[in-house]
Amino acid sequence: MNGADTAFVLICAALVMFMTPGLGLFYGSMVRSKNVLATIMQSFIIVGLVSVLWAVAGYTLAFGKDIGGVIGNLDFLFLNGVGMTAGPYSDTIPHLAFMIFQCMFAVITPALITGAFAERMKFGGFLVFTTLWLFIVYAPMAHWVWGKGWMAQMGALDFAGGAVVHMSSAAAALAATVVMGKRKGYGRMAFIPHNLPMTVLGAAILWFGWFGFNAGSALAADGFAANAFVTTHLAAAAAALSWIFMEWRHSGKPTTLGAASGAVAGLVAITPGAGFVTAMPAILIGLVGGVLCFSAVLLKGKLGYDDSLDVVGVHGVGGTWGAIATGLFASINKAQGLFYGNPSQLWIQLASVAATWAFCFVASLVLFKLVDATIGLRASDEEEDRGLDLSQHNETGYQA
Amino acid sequence: MNGADTAFVLICAALVMFMTPGLGLFYGSMVRSKNVLATIMQSFIIVGLVSVLWAVAGYTLAFGKDIGGVIGNLDFLFLNGVGMTAGPYSDTIPHLAFMIFQCMFAVITPALITGAFAERMKFGGFLVFTTLWLFIVYAPMAHWVWGKGWMAQMGALDFAGGAVVHMSSAAAALAATVVMGKRKGYGRMAFIPHNLPMTVLGAAILWFGWFGFNAGSALAADGFAANAFVTTHLAAAAAALSWIFMEWRHSGKPTTLGAASGAVAGLVAITPGAGFVTAMPAILIGLVGGVLCFSAVLLKGKLGYDDSLDVVGVHGVGGTWGAIATGLFASINKAQGLFYGNPSQLWIQLASVAATWAFCFVASLVLFKLVDATIGLRASDEEEDRGLDLSQHNETGYQA
Amino acid sequence: MNGADTAFVLICAALVMFMTPGLGLFYGSMVRSKNVLATIMQSFIIVGLVSVLWAVAGYTLAFGKDIGGVIGNLDFLFLNGVGMTAGPYSDTIPHLAFMIFQCMFAVITPALITGAFAERMKFGGFLVFTTLWLFIVYAPMAHWVWGKGWMAQMGALDFAGGAVVHMSSAAAALAATVVMGKRKGYGRMAFIPHNLPMTVLGAAILWFGWFGFNAGSALAADGFAANAFVTTHLAAAAAALSWIFMEWRHSGKPTTLGAASGAVAGLVAITPGAGFVTAMPAILIGLVGGVLCFSAVLLKGKLGYDDSLDVVGVHGVGGTWGAIATGLFASINKAQGLFYGNPSQLWIQLASVAATWAFCFVASLVLFKLVDATIGLRASDEEEDRGLDLSQHNETGYQA
Amino acid sequence: MKKVEIITRTFKLDDVKAALSEIGIKGMTVSEVKGFGRQGGHKEVYRGAEYQVDFVVKVKVEVVVEDSVVPDVIKAATTAARTGQVGDGKIFVVPVEEVVRIRTGETGDAAV
Amino acid sequence: MKKVEIITRTFKLDDVKAALSEIGIKGMTVSEVKGFGRQGGHKEVYRGAEYQVDFVVKVKVEVVVEDSVVPDVIKAATTAARTGQVGDGKIFVVPVEEVVRIRTGETGDAAV
Amino acid sequence: MKKVEIITRTFKLDDVKAALSEIGIKGMTVSEVKGFGRQGGHKEVYRGAEYQVDFVVKVKVEVVVEDSVVPDVIKAATTAARTGQVGDGKIFVVPVEEVVRIRTGETGDAAV
Ligand SMILES: Nc1ncnc2c1ncn2[C@@H]1O[C@H](COP(=O)(O)OP(=O)(O)O)[C@@H](O)[C@H]1O
Ligand SMILES: Nc1ncnc2c1ncn2[C@@H]1O[C@H](COP(=O)(O)OP(=O)(O)O)[C@@H](O)[C@H]1O
Ligand SMILES: Nc1ncnc2c1ncn2[C@@H]1O[C@H](COP(=O)(O)OP(=O)(O)O)[C@@H](O)[C@H]1O
């Protein structure tokens, strides 16, 4: 046990917790004002819902003793045996600190999905879907990668959640657009963010919290953490720049929304490799991440599917690029990528990317269909017209 | 002296400081827009006012050497002798770090009260009341519980301020409603929050800061802190859920305001026991806390007193429940509650609850009456109509 | 290497990073709503732009091995040799942690300038100016004071950036107003902050982050850091009070904007001396800082130059007062000011103040003229009328 | 048909609406406006700069009714909105030549 | 000259604008209003307190046109704005005695 | 009595108000509107999606005055609001049949 590591991980956990309501503000700012609360609410209540589910059973499924590479056993059900002393995943911090740090990751991941079905989801269906998804998609994914499951065993590198967090949520987002269809008027009416200063606030909270996310994933206050902190920051910075330069070229002017979106894209892209690459490759990962995600978002317009807030374009594309880039640029400790003489790492990364997308997309599709067929996913036309704030929550966001 | 503990407590102090302006946004968002600044201002300027008063004399009254169990002596007047080395309350952190951590508690407590008299208080009267209240109510309370005063001596458990922070401010809030009466039009006009996204932002900042509040109260970066961090998070999560489920049953739909209110209620409820109970009881404390506070807020409507932003319903009821629950569920180190074979702890808790309410209510009532009779508490009818932003501060919150 | 110090500095770096978007919100809230995004964007994109430039060449110019007291050498170009082990500026934290902590200072400094030319600057010109200014003004200043350059050698005290951050940006701000002239309608139309709750949020984020800024500058989690934390908080608190009391006297009522402005003024004023003075002098520095900055802001109205958001009045005056006050009140370790028997420190401080203003003003003036003559600084009349959000970024901040 | 425009204090809106409902008015349209008049405005101060704001927030209620109902509307609105202080506002009556209910295409009296 | 005031649902604004453009209308002025009518309002709940909100957000389009164009405007707007549900709104026609284009000082038909 | 409606650029409001005050106008009512006209709108871009926004923010000033004052109002407003660029706006004059001051119940000329 080490006080410095404990202090560091606990503060990092607080930072990561702050991200999810921050994500709510980020997402909520980009919908029309009649849906602002419903959108924020989804992220906010996920902090409540998933945290409790995680303590009850999620943690043990993800981090209980490995069963065949597939899932954790039930040793830690109801946090039984998760105490103030060190646990199996770190010698230097209390087991409870590790558990709660991981809890914050389990919280934000399903919250990311909500961007895809924003402005048309029923609140009840959303709660049920999220509950199922946590146990059936997230917990296994976390186990495979961080809980000594098969992906870890095969050597896949995912420092802070390119697969577990970003690809998994993006695959679910894609499934959502398939099952739920477009918002009323999509392609015909203007869907314009209603409060961009709040978007920047949300992005700032995300960026701030992401230091906890990535540097905290070192689970220790050391040079490794410092490196992850630096790569995180530089990739975000670089992607904010490359996104707005793409915009500048494409439509004549750089935008604030573009800068915020680019920063998030960079943060996503560096997540899988934050602790494995050094600063200059991190800048490159960010630059390319900004370009790729911007292009993917543009492409969405052409493909015509309605991923309301670009979960696939940002988290899917950014996370995938980051996982591959880790296979190219990893150079720290035993993690070595293609450019450092280890081509096999790239193949492992590609395999883990493919498996993640396939599993998460199919499983999410099934869950969405299931909920749709039972209690229903989509708000009625009339509810969508009035806005979800009134129709789902009897509230309105702003009063004159 | 220990660097890890010092780092932890300093960062926690920063987190707690952030809570008070966050509370200002939380409160300010819930009033009508013509009072948004006046409401935010009360919290913000309290950070200024109380911090200076604390350094000058508040700290020594609360934490100076004990005089008869009642008050601290004047050894630390003007922070004399409070230096960079360890002080009497912790061997591992600088005395200055302990002092400033406590300062943030002294700051937020009177800020909590402002929710009760929002939309009708004169700024001058508010400043004078707050000054008096800090010295006459808060400093003694802090001394009794944390400064080795009589409540500590009798063995009352209050980890991070159920009595010192929440019951004390709620008792003052109750006194405020008695002395000041209702807002103009209360019960006849609609009093609707004017900016609920800001409410969620405020609640998020509170939740984030509360990790500093509760985990920081361990004064060390260890397993004890990790446990307090976990119980804090889980209770907030559980109460957000139970509050919205109550709403769902009661009026057909869960609300965003309810989720935010529930989270705060859970944070309040776990505060006295955060370091003494384990994770599963924390979930229970949160669940029950959400139900009780929701019910208390409903009841207010029926009792007809005008506690504008439900300080009594949330902090009074939540803090009281938390203090009692600590007497039931405490199970860590020497703290043992009824369910762990120590019924006497419950009696001690009940006694401290009763004493806190009685002392703080009566003392606050006297102070409010005093200020009312001298410089005045309540804005004139015309000022209330125009809004306090213009009438107290010559400003308006928003321009088109 | 020391884990506690590393944890502390990394978290502090995250706090300082959060300040710059917070500054964007602070500034953006005070302009008219048609310019809110353009103003926020300048701060936000600086995080991107300057971070990358810093990693590439800024850091080495500031902190490379000293060349004649004037500039750093190119040893650390592209962060070459800046790694996970300790570097030349601290034995207890990774070199990368020191680099990124300093990066956040390099980021916020040019962002401070943007307040001066708000509501009339072209985005392209702004990017070019900022790039040049970082290398030609900021990097040398940082080197002279913190990189073992001539100011450090002569014994000037600047704990966290009175000269490097605040005077330098204020001198640039003054140069901006000289080169760019007033906003259209200045003095004739009303320039009223469009969203004061957001101003308070911005100020709260700044205050919160400033703990990282000042306490983090101790580069260690010890009593020295605790002292800097305390002085920072108390000076901000005192200045918020003294600013509103000045307002009360001057125009009959205290304002929320005044409280927020005062807090920032106090934070600026304590920055150079935070680690060198004790708590009571810090309160005095804050009280005087609030009065001086308020008076300077009033004076602006009379002098008739258009420093849109009072960069000179707050950062220039506050930073200068702080540097002088350090020469008066310094009393910790080897730092001793006039009142502690060392009058020569005051002369050194005055010399460093004069040199900083002279160098930064002249260099900034040249850079502004250069950019003005080449790609242009000022938006056209028509662009200014439509608002910079539309004319520079094709966006609008708020939708009904 | 006439359009009666009632410009008055915001916090009187509910009372005016109730008074009109009472005399059988089934529809009205409301907008937020700013008024300039004898009532005068207020001072605002930002970092020491004082601004005189001449406009006061008011509400405008528009009701289209048959000619015969106009006096009742004026009476009801006047009674409901009056405080007796400067700034109570004005009522204007404007002729309306045609009325159409979009939903049904009905015109004239049937449409209001 | 007449002023045609069209009060209808917000999300129909684009359709109405398009329909009017189609018949050659070159200018119009739009404001956000709140309507009270048969459509009824909705309930809002804040911390358990229920409020009945009677007003519904609507949009008001004002078009000043020559007398002869009025029927076309009514027809175009009615068609574009109709959903058939209660709350589609109203059209009012008000006489206009003079029109001036500020830029040129032109008056009458030349000014619209 | 007539109601003169002046629709013009937002930043001209202060000038128009001053010009009207100068000719003795004691009251007016202002609302924020969006105009569609020859001036055209602007492009907005959000994550690569381009939207043409046709509406421009304008301000509408309504002044009710005696018939005889109308020409003066038109002249004052035109002069104050004119920039000469497309988009300066319009003035419409509408008949008013009755005016009531709510505070006193006064009607007609005494009420404005
Ligand atoms: N001549 C006018 N034309 C249009 N609106 C007017 C006129 N005079 C007054 N108003 C409106 O009526 C409101 C109240 O007028 P005011 O002179 O302040 O008080 P009172 O109605 O008590 O005489 C003003 O704020 C303005 O909105
Ligand atoms: N008499 C009236 N005067 C002014 N506006 C009216 C009147 N009646 C209705 N309105 C406006 O028309 C809108 C629609 O009216 P409503 O009665 O709800 O449905 P419908 O137009 O289908 O009959 C209302 O919200 C209101 O804005
Ligand atoms: N026929 C009309 N009816 C109502 N409002 C109109 C009409 N034509 C123009 N307007 C208003 O006048 C404004 C200015 O008109 P525009 O054609 O852009 O320029 P100009 O007034 O210089 O000819 C428009 O934005 C709109 O608000």
Image (tube, coloured by chain):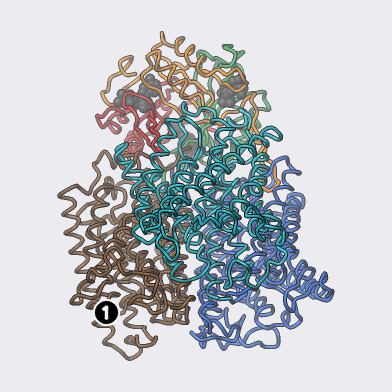
Chain colours: A cyan, B blue, C brown, D green, E orange, F red
Label 1: chain letter = C
Q: Residue at x 33, y 47 (%)?
A: A242
Q: Quadrant of the C terminus of chain B?
A: top left
**Splitting the image into 4 quarters, where does residue C86 fall?**
bottom left
Q: Residue at x 72, y 69 (%)?
A: B277
Q: Residue at x 55, y 51 (%)?
A: A164
Q: Quadrant of ligand 3?
A: top left
B242 is higher (above) or lower (below) than F52: below
Q: In what element is the residue under mark 1?
A: helix
Foreground of the two, C234 or F13: C234
A29 is higher (above) or lower (below) than A273: above
Question: Does residue D93 appear in this view?
Answer: yes
| C56 left or right, relative to C395 | left
Instruction: Please provide percent x and percent y for residue E90.
Output: 55, 19
Foreground of the two, C175 or E35: C175
Residue picked out by circle 1:
C152
Residue with the most extreme bottom position: C341
| Type of amino acid at the residue the image marks with label 1 | Ala
Question: Does residue B55 appear in this view?
Answer: no
Q: How many marks?
A: 1
| C275 left or right, relative to C144 | right
**Splitting the image into 4 quarters, where does residue D83 fall?**
top right
Q: Residue at x 67, y 63 (%)?
A: B268
